[in-house]
Structures are given as structure tokens and as C-alpha cells.
Image: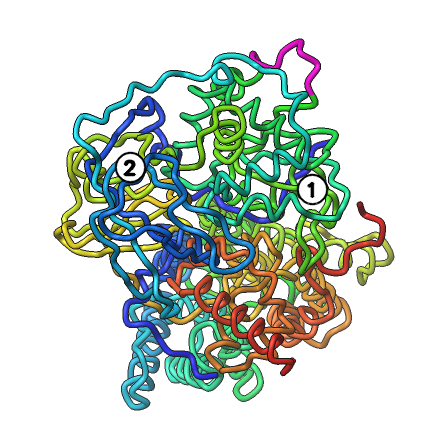
Amino acid sequence: MKHFFHGGIHPTDGSDKLLSNQAPIRMYTPKTVEISMKQSPNSVCQALVKAGDQVLKGDIIGKPVKFGAANIHASISGRVSQIKTIHDDQNREIEIVIIEADENEEAAQKLGEYEEKLVDLSGYSREVIIEKMKEGGLVGMGGAGFPTHVKYETTEVINYILVNAAECEPYLTCDHMLMLEQGHGIINGVLLLAKAAGAMKAFICLEDNKKDAAKSLEEIIANKDLPIEIRMLPTKYPQGGERQLVESVLGTEVPAGELPAKIGVIINNVGTAKALADIVLGNKPLTSRVVTVTGKVNNPSNYLVPIGTKFTELIKESGGTTAKINRIVEGGPMTGASCLIGEEIDELNESVSKTTAGILILEDSSRDETPCIRCGECERVCPAGLAPFKIDFAVLEDDISLSNKLYATECISCGCCTYVCPARRELAYRVTVAKNEIFKLRREGAI
Amino acid sequence: MKLKRPEQLHEISPHIETSRSSKEIMQDVVIALIPAFLGSIYFFGINSIIIVLTAVTTCVLSEYIWQKIRKEQLTTSDWSCVVTGMLLAFSCPPTTPIWAVIIASAFAILVAKQFFGGVGSNFANPALMGRALLMFLWPASVSQYVTTFHEGSDAVSSATVLGLVKSGTEISSYSKWDMFIGNVPGCIGETSALLLLIGFAYLCYRKVVNFAAAGTYTLTVLLITFVFSNEGLFQGDILTNLLSGGLILGACYMMTDYASVAPRVKVTLAAIAGIITAVFRIWGMLPEGVMYGILAANCLSGLVDALIRPHIYGVNLKKNSK
């Protein structure tokens, strides 16, 4: 029985992925890293080191200030040269640990056994794996950055693991390349995820524009009687949305306001699976990740870089930008955050975090909003089944209770509505505004 | 809560967007209407040029002046008033006096469109509202039909095909082929099924309109007029009903209008409009029911939209769906 998620779009013709889906993952090790103590939106850590300290790669340098965050480790060996403090968008103080690498520290990377074949995992119990997730600072590497161990500490009975390898965002190819090159590590990681959850089966879910990756994973699991199934899904954005993936693969929906665990499912990104294998089987905490640098650059590439590598270095490594006015986006074009708009890229302060899947350079363009013509496209493509044009109207009228009645809270912020709007209305933005406002009012008990 | 408008909205994701704009959609509709316009010049001569140009000019000017006076964002460049003007002219007979065209056009834009908030906020199709105004206030101005050039040497007064059927007259003088290509008396843009369908095919190809809505409307009208015809049950003349009275113009270009037909329930509304049109055709005083059918559906749009609830992901799931 085939299932499809509701709505969705085909934002590009696929040529965007061709830019970098033939570029093998290259190692890049910078001389300096700037590791933010905020690696994902809701987990802020406190730096355990001070300027002048010597650190070794893998040392814990940041501990969560509150429950539900993940440790942060030094991503290179060297000396802490400085600790900067900046303020984030919520006006929280965020420390940034700057580490300068030791001279001639270019340790040759040797592949671990788990990266070349499937290994015996019988020695690892559920508790041990979850503890290692916690120690190793594992977070969801698809973008949301939710600490993985928190997902697995659920009291619900988990039947299935969905490994999200859809990579439905245009341009990004880091997961695709990882699957082509690190198949064994990924399969070992997926088996570990299934053990950690006590799940009976794991589905690795790919869009059908990555047939080569699916084939190489199939070859690894062939005739091994593993509880893993490779599932090919149509290429359609947002196929890799957590809730859409559940609908596509299992044909059920996650109840509103609940986590997928409620219906016995945990979803993790394929990069997270590989990182878990590194932590558990390779004894390497999460200190690096694969980043796609693409769009308007001379040599779109995929890099394996230490956390904290500066964006500017990676853009220069990729031959510099070709855009007249750069719009630099962290992540994909649909949900990524714009971090700089300008002709020069030197003002770019951002560095790679655990959730940076890509650095995308686009030609900047402006959008002028015109009145809604009520074509209904936004409603047709909304994966949540909302009518964004109505919520847009309600938000502009300051009518929060109407937004609530229109289920603005169920928005997944995928951006499909804004993408298709011929009147260029900022639909996704306003629905998200309404959603956040409703949640705030609910917390205050006002509605 | 007062929403603060961020200084640069375009910094917000998504960072890519479709190349299609409102203007492009409206231009597509105008392009689609051009074959029928050219056909009307061929069938009815200079009158159709004068009426179409008058309607379009009045529509654009009315919108421009209104928005200048009210100091609103100008929307004349989005071509929606050109579409309104063309559709209004298309639903007037070639004998319509110019003053009537001007009044109807100004009414369509000012009252039917701008009074309700401008583009996208009108509750009914402005062109049909303009046509309805003429029908109610000066029925004589829109009921003088003439034969086409190519029937005889001069244009002479004649009833439309549906009018003849209604009065029980034999219609054998018009072949189905004449009706298909548009060589029959009627409103400027409604007579040629062929040319309207060519334009509609273009709109479908450009994915501007909802084929299902147009199809549902047409089929509903044909089914009901076939079953309950004046000649007796299951005796209706399907082809005559299809090719006359502006059914194709209404189905392809007015039933598919965006603002006045709630998008999610378009097909349901098309069926409702079809039922009303058929009822007017069979039992009404006047032969053509397209205008009434679609205007009535426009008025029911909000109600139907509220009654048929959408499925929101994860909301109201069946129990035990685990």
C-alpha cells in the first residue's frame, strides 16, 4: 500500500542538486575554530574552559545550563585563545570558544572497523547507547538539533525508527554523499538507533532522486536478515518533514500537539545515525559534520569539517561566490536562515554548528507583497492542510483567536505557501508569527 | 498583538519562490481570451472592438482613479481589471450602447470590486455583476441580438439560439457547426465554443485554472437540462445547450474565477452553479441562466467553504489509528 503526504511542491527542476551531488566529501581542517555554546535553538551550554587552556580534540568544553541539551566537545586540539560573548535573537548571552590548532597536528584519519563492515552490536544495551548519545553530545543533524538522547528516553513503546534520508531541501547533498561514502557506518548507526529504542524495524527513507545511494545501502544489507528496510519515496518537498515522513511511510498521522513517539515512532536524520556509530563504535564524540557549500560559488563542494569552522573559510575554499549581491543562507533555501546579505562576505561571523547541513549562496532578490488574489495555491500545497491566506489575513487584522480557529498551531513552517504565492505574500512568516503568539498565550493561560 | 513588520521581509525563509506572479496569471487569461476576441471581430465587426476597448479602458481608469483618490496601493498594473473589462464586454451583445458599457464597467470595478476591498476581496465576479446591473436596470440595452456578418449581407435583429428554443421556434437554420465556430447571434465573446476552448486549453496548459470546476459546471448543466427538458424527460438537446447561451464562456472563464469562488470548494460550487443555471434554463423566464447560476454560487461561496471542513494534519484523527 503506497501512501502520500498531503500537499507539497516541486520547488526546483533538480539541477540545484546536480551542482554538488558528484562532489566527494573532502576533509577540511581549519587553523581556528569558533565553537558557539548554542549549537541548536533551545540548548545553551556553559563553557568549561577559559582563555589559555590547552584542549584535546574530543574534550568536553561545554555543559548544558539546563536539562535537555547536549554536551559540546573541542573539535580540534589546540589552545583556547579567547572566549567571546554575543547576544542571540532572544537576547541570551552566548559564549563562543575560539580554539587555535596546534602546529603540525594533522593526524591521519584511519577508517574504523565499523566504517568498513557490519559489526557485532550485541554488547551494547539500550541504556549504554542512550548514555553514549548523551556523553557524545549527539543532536539531530537534520536541522532542528533536538538532543537525541531525550527522544530515546521516552516511556512510550517504540515500534519503528524512521531514518530520514529524504534530503528534500533543494541544493543540499551532504546526506546523499554521506550515504554513498559511509554506508557501513550508517547501517551500523541505524542498528544502534533501533536497539536504543527497542524498535522492531527501521526504515531508511530516501527520495527517488537518490537511487544510487539507495542501491549502495541495499547492497550492504542484502541477505543479512537485518530489521532494516530501504524505502523510496517520491521527490517532493517537504518529504523529509517529520510528520510528512510518518504519513508517507506508515500511512498514519501524528496527532496534533504530540511527538511521533506517541504513535510508536522515532525519526532521526541519516547523519545522526552515522554520528551515533562514530560515538559508540569509534569512540569519537560529535565534533565534525558534513556540510554542503553550494549555490552561487565557483566550486560547489561537500566538506567534512570540525564544528566551529568559519563559513567564510569554506566559501573561499569553494572558490568564492559568483553572486553580485550575496544572500548567504545556513541550511537549505526553503527553511534555512539568512545570515548575511551583501556584496562582501567578510562580515560573515557564523561558523559551522552541529546542525549546519549547508552553506548556500544565492543571488539576493527582493519581493514586493501585492494583494492576495485568492488563487488558493497556498492551501493546495500546505502539508498541514491549512489555509495560509486566511491566517495571513487574520494576522494582519490582529485576530489571534481566528488564527487559532484556523489551526495556525499546526503549521510546520515548511515555507511551501510563500514559495507558491503569486502575490509574493509572506504567508509562512505570518503563520509562524501567529503560531508562536498562540503558544505564548496558551502558556499564559489566556486561550 | 500588533504585528511589527520586519524591515526586510525578504530575508525570511523560504529564499526561493515560484517565477509565477499575479500579473502573469492575469496576462495569461487575457492571452486566452484573444482568440475569442478576434473571432468576435470576424463575426460582429467593428462593434466588438469598440465595446471591448470601451469596457477595458473604463475598468482600468475606474480602478486607477479610485485608488488615486483613496491613496491606496495601485493595482492597475496587475491586469486584473483588463480581464474584468474583457469578460464584461464578452457578455454584452454587439448592439449594446456605449453608455451602458461604460456604466457597467465602472459599476463592476467600483462597486463589485473596490467597495469590497479590491482585487481578491470581491464576493462576486465583477464582470458578471456589471452585466447583471444592465440586465436589471436597462434590460433593453442587452437584449438586442443580431445575426453575424456571415449569415447574410447585413446584420439583422435576431433572437439567440436559446431564445428561439425557449419560444418554441425551430432552430434548424443554425447548424451545430455554426454554433461551434460561433457563427450565430449572441453576446460578443460567447458564441464561438471553438475559440473559447482554444483559450481554455492554453489556461489549462499554463495551470492557471481548475479544469475540474469548469468540467463539473458544464456537466451538471448538461445533465439536468437533458433529463428535465421542455420536450420531456431525457429529451434535452445536449449539444444546443452546450454550445449556446454563454455556457462555455461561463464555465471556462467565470466559474474558474479566483476571488469569488473559494478555492478548496470550487468543484462543489461549480455543481451548485450548474444546478441553478439549469433551473433557470428550463423553468426561468429568460433563456440564459449562466449569469444567475454563477452569481448565486459566488454568494454561497463563503457558506460552502465554512460547511465543508478541511482535514488538518493530526487533528480529529480516528481513534486507534496506531
Q: Are marks 1 and 2 in contact (CB under 8 Å)?
A: no
Would you call the spot at circle 2 few (<14 residues within 10 Å), some (14-19), or many (20 or more)?
many
On the image, the x and y values in percent for residue A219 come to 56, 12
**In which image quadrant can residue B58 be found?**
bottom left
Q: CA distance from mark 1 to mark 2?
A: 32 Å
Q: Residue at x 23, y 27 (%)?
A: A105
Of residues A254 and B42, which is closer to you in this image? A254
Q: Where, quadrant-wise, is the N terminus of chain A in this rendering?
A: top right
- The answer to whether A207 is drawn above or below residue A431 in the figure is above
Element assignment for label 2: strand
Vertical order, A401 against A154 (above or below): below
Which of the two labelled residues, at mark 1 and mark 2, occupies the earlier sequence position?
Answer: 1
- Mark yes or no: residue B127 visible: yes
Out of B195 and A245, give the one closest to the viewer. A245
Q: Is residue B38 visible?
A: no
Q: Quadrant of the C terminus of chain A?
A: bottom right
Q: How many marks?
A: 2
Residue beneath the point at 50% across and 82% down: A398
Kindly indicate the quadrant of the structure image that contains residue B275: bottom right
Q: Residue furthest top?
A: A223
Residue B105: quarter of image: bottom left
Is residue B250 shown left or right of residue A170? right
Main SS class of the magenta portion in the image = loop
* Amino acid at dot 1: Val
Q: Which residues are magenta?
A: A219-226
Picture coordinates of residue B159, whole percent (x, y):
58, 68
The image shows residue A269, relative to residue B51, as above or below, that is above
Residue lying at the far front in this picture: please name it.
A53
The residue tagged 1 is A265
How packed mark 1 is, by other alpha carbons closer than 10 Å (few <14, some 14-19, many 20 or more), is: many
Local secondary structure at mark 1 = strand
Checking the image for residue A293, the label placed there is 2
